[in-house]
Image: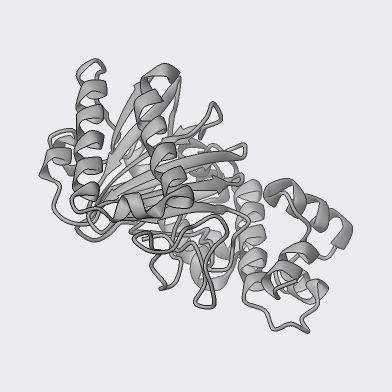
Amino acid sequence: MPVAADSGGQAPGLASGPVSADRGPFRSWVPGVEQRNLLTSRDHAFVEQHVWLGTIGLSVTKRPPGITTGTVHGAARMISFPMGSPRPERINGRRLRDTYFWIAGEGSDVDIVERDPWFTANIVFPDDAGELDQLRPGGELAVYEVRQPTLGPLRDLVESVIQTAIRAPHLLAEAGVGSAIAENVLVALSRMASGNQSETVRLSFPMAHRLVRKIDEYVNTVGAGHVRARKLSREIGRSLRTIHASLVAVKGVGLSQYLLSSRLWDVRRALETAPPDTLVKTIALDNGFWHLGRFAQRYREQFGETPSETLHNRCGG
């Protein structure tokens, strides 16, 4: 599950009592997904609220621009949708024409291109939720494109639960509340799905996607700041032209933009875990940013704060 606070304290805006947050490492904005651009347990700039009721978890997270790649692990099923008009541009290489909700479970591949900042809501069933599998043909990531008003009931439910957790947490301590909320979610989903054509999003470009997975693995192993184009081409066994075309087909960005986004995320993770006396300059240079002014500008454009502010907030400033 997502972590709303580090081991030293409670996240802002979360009530105590029946509402709790997993205190393990924050592995992903989508619970159970191992992904490249990981947030850390201290990254309160993006983790907005998280409510855990034992049988169901709900969270709202602010997402900066980026490229999310991963595979869902574990028995949990999850539902994800935007809380407002801004939304991702692509899911698994497919451009979205309208807003959406998606359902994922064990083995679902997720490849999301996020051009603009946005808020995502996630509802997680940690145990068996076979009803959701009926809406997820073949066990793949199932995406339903819907009109904005169609998501109203789910958005209202998430907002209501989170506000109750903040203002009157004792109400959520009553027996059966989690199960009742889960039932409301399933009813709302069934109603929405019945009026929309389910489009199961498989890997839209199978060959390109397999190549991009190799690129992701290589970049994750060596670090984006240490990737050299010609060596990448040799390691992957494909020409730079093919690598570029595959990234554009799947992620909607070319090699240079892909590496830039990955390097910025590497810097952010390093800042989040750096000792107090660390210099931003040192981390920037370690990740291949030699023009510090341009680096600071790009960092702020992506994350909405300066590198120094990230380091300052991490150190409890």
Q: Position of residue 111 (x, y in %)?
A: 42, 45
266 or 103, nearer to the observer: 103
Horizontally, residue 284 falls left or right of residue 182, namely right
Q: Percent x, y for residue 134?
A: 12, 35
Q: Is residue 115 left or right of residue 168?
A: right
- Quadrant assignment, res 187: top left
Q: How many marks?
A: 0
Asked if residue 308 lies left or right of residue 130, the reply is right
Toward which corner of the image does residue 285 lie, by quadrant?
Answer: bottom right
Residue 65, position in %: x, y? 61, 44
Vertical placement of 265 versus 113: above or below? Answer: below
Please name whichever residue, 114 or 228, is drawn nearer the observer in this view of the structure: 114
Query: Would residue 96 be visible to someone looking at this image?
Result: yes
20 and 133: which is toward the camera:
20
Residue 53 in picture, x, y percent from top left: 29, 56
Query: Relative to 9, does residue 209 appear above or below in the rendering?
Result: above
Q: Residue at x 19, y 27 (%)?
A: 190
Q: Can I make out residue 140 in this image?
A: no
Scheme of colours in the image = one colour
Q: Which residue does the image show at 72% across and 74% down from the upper left?
A: 286
213 left or right of 194 in image: right
Residue that appears at 46% across and 58% down: 15
Q: Quadrant of the C terminus?
A: bottom right
Q: Quadrant of the N terminus?
A: bottom left
Query: What residue is at 32 percent from the left and 40 percent from the top?
Result: 203
